[in-house]
Amino acid sequence: MKDITRRNALQTAATMTVGAAVGTITASCATTATGMKTPFAVSDTYIPIVGSDMVYPVRRIYCIGRNYRAHSIEMGSNPDREPPFFFQKPTDAIQNVAIGTVGEHPYPTLTKNYHYEVELVAALSKGGRNIPVESALQHVYAYAVGLDMTRRDLQRAMGDEKKPWEIGKSFDRSAPIGPLHLADKTGHFTKGGIWLKVNGQSKQNANLSQMIWSVAEQISRLSQAFELQAGDIIYSGTPENVGPVVRGDTIECGIEGLPNLSVKIV
């Protein structure tokens, strides 16, 4: 923890470069909130909250793999017998993109096959262990539209070698996201359209009701493996027809009931 006042955090969040910000705020001094000194300062990550002067502090980013039947099939899996599996991204993978803007998203190094994946993101305000499915949505604070950007060639290469494929998923700015919308205003998203276009051409088009594991079930399953806490966000899976983008392409994506998210690959 760093010695950052709430006012400083809000001022920094408000002046972030639109679209290009990675959502991190760096402490101005290397002293913790408890007064302990550290050899250097480490940045924190926040996501803006719509209709509020507060920002949401990100503790962990969880992602579920192959959570739509057709996408599971296109990735070579059997959706009828595969239990849910999860991976994590670092918090500095967050790239905040303001409503009504087109964020500049850098094409990453080491890849020649860079893929988009549009997803519903759930942000938690409380956690716990072994959370029942029936009460899991009580832990959701807000929702947003997100992109799980993927270096697909690196992911597949690591998978073929039966090695961890974080290098394909967990890298700088690999998690563009729109601002958070409070669940008590939007309601919980169990159905509704989810879609993505590249340069105006439809690529992904499905319904949230087609998830294999609902957001509530994901929270419950995750809490069996980890103690969930406030500040955890969950990328809840992408539908079929993932595909590549190159520099100059513009991605626009959306979920029914939330503002669209747009980025340009640069």
Image (tube, grey):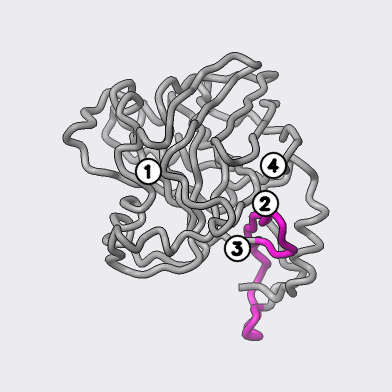
Residue 18 spot, x, y in % from top left:
78, 43
Residue 220 spot, x, y in % from top left:
31, 58
Please indicate whether residue 20 sits to the left or right of residue 79 in the image. Answer: right
Asked if the residues shown at circle 1 and circle 4 are in contact, with their CB atoms under 8 angstroms apart, the answer is: no
Secondary structure of the residue carrying numbered label 2: loop
Q: What amino acid is labelled 1 in the image?
A: Ile
Residue 100 spot, x, y in % from top left:
75, 36
Between disc 1 and disc 4, whose residue precedes? Answer: 1
Indicate whether 226 appears above or below 62: below
Question: Quick one: 167 or 239, which is closer to the camera?
Answer: 239
Please indicate whether residue 100 sits to the left or right of residue 90 in the image. Answer: right
Asked if the residues shown at circle 4 and circle 3 are in contact, with their CB atoms under 8 angstroms apart, the answer is: no
Question: Quick one: 116 or 112, which is closer to the camera?
Answer: 116
Indicate whether 146 appears above or below 124: above
Asked if the residues shown at circle 3 and circle 1 are in contact, with their CB atoms under 8 angstroms apart, the answer is: no
Please indicate whether residue 66 sits to the left or right of residue 198 in the image. Answer: left
Q: What amino acid is labelled 4 in the image?
A: Val
Question: Quick one: 159 or 178, which is closer to the camera?
Answer: 178
Count neighbours of disc 1 (C-alpha within 10 A) and say few if under 14, some if 14 to 19, many if 20 or more.
Answer: some
Secondary structure of the residue carrying numbered label 3: strand
For the residues labelled 3 and 1, the Cα–Cα distance comes to: 21 Å
Residue bearing mark 4: 97
Task: Pick the quarter of the image with the N terminus.
Answer: bottom right
Secondary structure of the residue carrying numbered label 1: strand
Between disc 1 and disc 2, whose residue precedes? Answer: 2
Q: What amino acid is labelled 2 in the image?
A: Gly
For the residues labelled 3 and 2, the Cα–Cα distance comes to: 10 Å
